[in-house]
């Protein structure tokens, strides 16, 4: 898969600055209000009773704040935060070593928990009955086995963020990075980061570079627009891949319905990548629709690409 500037997943070199931008307490964690409200009550209750929290499963597309939220929960519980990921645990011994090092009340975060091998997953079950808090995160809730899922007392889905929420996140990050930014500059980035804080922060950094080199250093709306143009990101926050996907559905398949496998084949991508990475945002903003017979491009997609709209034939879905 090609490296995308608007990918929700983290690039290796981003880890150090992400850490500095990561909110530490629930009050700094923007958005996801109902998830936060629920967690807040659960945390207060557990602190009051001196009992550990129920295990928590967080799911949603990459970059929406699952890891951040897990570390915020640990902070709120004044607990140690340990983190690992499904693909990092190759042998039973790997997980056993992690589990034996946990202390009462510790938080264990397992990213990509759907990628734990079944025989390793079984080691986790008895451990989940001890008094330690396990927080699992996944982009694919559907791939979690029933026995594992049933062990999580709380299951929360993270949603894409609204423009005002993203503006808030961008302003906060700009302050931490000491990057001067105007309200309109903030708004411009917030509109084009696919509802994803990680993308917002990444764009902010790239635009700050651009502002330093080509301008006075201040991130204004025109500076942001020019920088995004250079990055080939359009008004909707789409890159070439998004446009290719929509164009394929419209021009090669008459707007759909077209199956996921076919879309993946046309783009020379894995089906999982299309389902997890490319289409969730297009579905969210209503450019694509999911139907029993496949994906359909909506009027918005036609308009965005400047192609005259032709509704799908009646009776097709
Ligand atoms: P995920 O685990 O879902 O892939 P992360 O928790 O690593 O996502 O979040 C990516 C980055 O986005 C974090 O480093 C953080 O700076 C930022 N971020 C995520 N959620 C929020 C939020 N609710 N408020 C502020 N910043 C956030």
Image (cartoon, grey):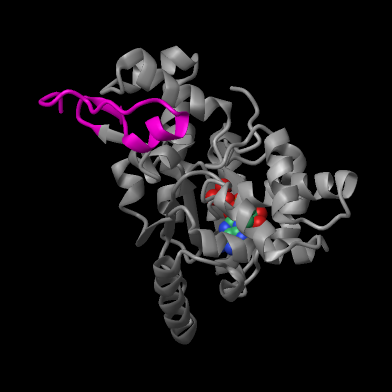
Image check: 79 left or right of 14?
left
Quadrant where the C terminus sits is top left
Q: Where is 316 relative to 237, above or below?
A: above
Closer to the camera in the image, 251 or 131: 251
Quadrant of picture, ligand 1: bottom right
Quarter assignment of residue 77:
bottom right
Q: Does the magenta run of residues contain 313?
A: yes
Quadrant where the N terminus sits is top right
Q: Where is 137 relative to 180, above or below?
A: above
Say which residue appears at 46% left-offset and 82% top-offset.
Answer: 44
The image shows residue 21 at horizontal and vertical percentages of 71, 60
Question: Residue reaching furthest left?
Answer: 315
**What number of labels is visible?**
0
Q: Where is 63 relative to 75, above or below?
A: above
Q: Does the magenta run of residues contain 79?
A: no
Closer to the camera in the image, 122 or 292: 292
Say which residue appears at 69% left-offset and 54% top-offset.
Answer: 221
The image shows residue 140 at horizontal and vertical percentages of 41, 40
Residue stretch rendered in magenta on the structure: 291-317
Quarter assignment of residue 229:
top right
Question: Residue reaching furthest bottom?
Answer: 48
Say which residue appears at 39% left-offset and 69% top-offset.
Answer: 34
Report whether residue 300 is seen: yes
The image shows residue 103 at horizontal and vertical percentages of 60, 64
The image shows residue 167 at horizontal and vertical percentages of 60, 62
Report whether residue 104 is seen: no
Image check: 105 left or right of 58?
right
């Amino acid at each position: 898969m090609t490296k995308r500037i608007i990918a929700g997943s983290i690039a290796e070199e981003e880890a150090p600055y992400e850490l500095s931008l990561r909110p530490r307490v629930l009050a700094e964690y923007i958005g996801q209000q109902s998830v936060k409200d629920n967690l807040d009550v659960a945390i207060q209750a557990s602190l009051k009773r001196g009992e550990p929290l129920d295990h928590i499963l967080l799911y949603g597309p990459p970059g929406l704040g699952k890891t951040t939220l897990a570390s915020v929960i640990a902070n709120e519980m004044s607990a140690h935060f340990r983190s690992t990921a499904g693909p990092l645990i190759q042998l039973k011994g790997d997980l056993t070593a992690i589990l034996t090092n946990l202390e009462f009340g510790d938080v264990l975060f397992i990213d990509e928990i759907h990628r734990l091998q079944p025989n390793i997953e079984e080691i986790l079950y008895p451990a989940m009955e001890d008094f330690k808090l396990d927080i699992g995160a996944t982009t694919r809730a559907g791939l979690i086995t029933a026995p594992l899922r049933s062990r999580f007392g709380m299951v929360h889905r993270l949603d894409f963020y609204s423009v005002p929420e993203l503006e808030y996140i961008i302003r906060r990050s700009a302050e931490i990075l000491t990057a001067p930014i105007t309200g309109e500059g903030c708004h411009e980035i917030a509109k084009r980061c696919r509802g994803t804080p990680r993308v917002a922060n990444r764009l902010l950094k790239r635009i700050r570079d651009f502002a330093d080199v080509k301008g006075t250093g201040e991130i204004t709306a025109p500076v942001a627009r020019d920088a995004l143009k250079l990055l080939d990101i359009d008004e909707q926050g789409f890159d070439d891949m998004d446009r290719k996907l929509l164009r394929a559905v419209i021009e090669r398949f008459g707007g759909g319905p077209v199956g996921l496998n076919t879309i993946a084949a046309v783009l020379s991508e894995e089906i999982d990548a299309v389902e997890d990475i490319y289409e969730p945002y297009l579905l969210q903003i209503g450019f694509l629709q999911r139907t029993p017979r496949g994906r359909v491009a909506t009027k918005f997609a036609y308009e965005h690409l400047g192609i005259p709209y032709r509704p799908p034939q009646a009776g097709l879905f």
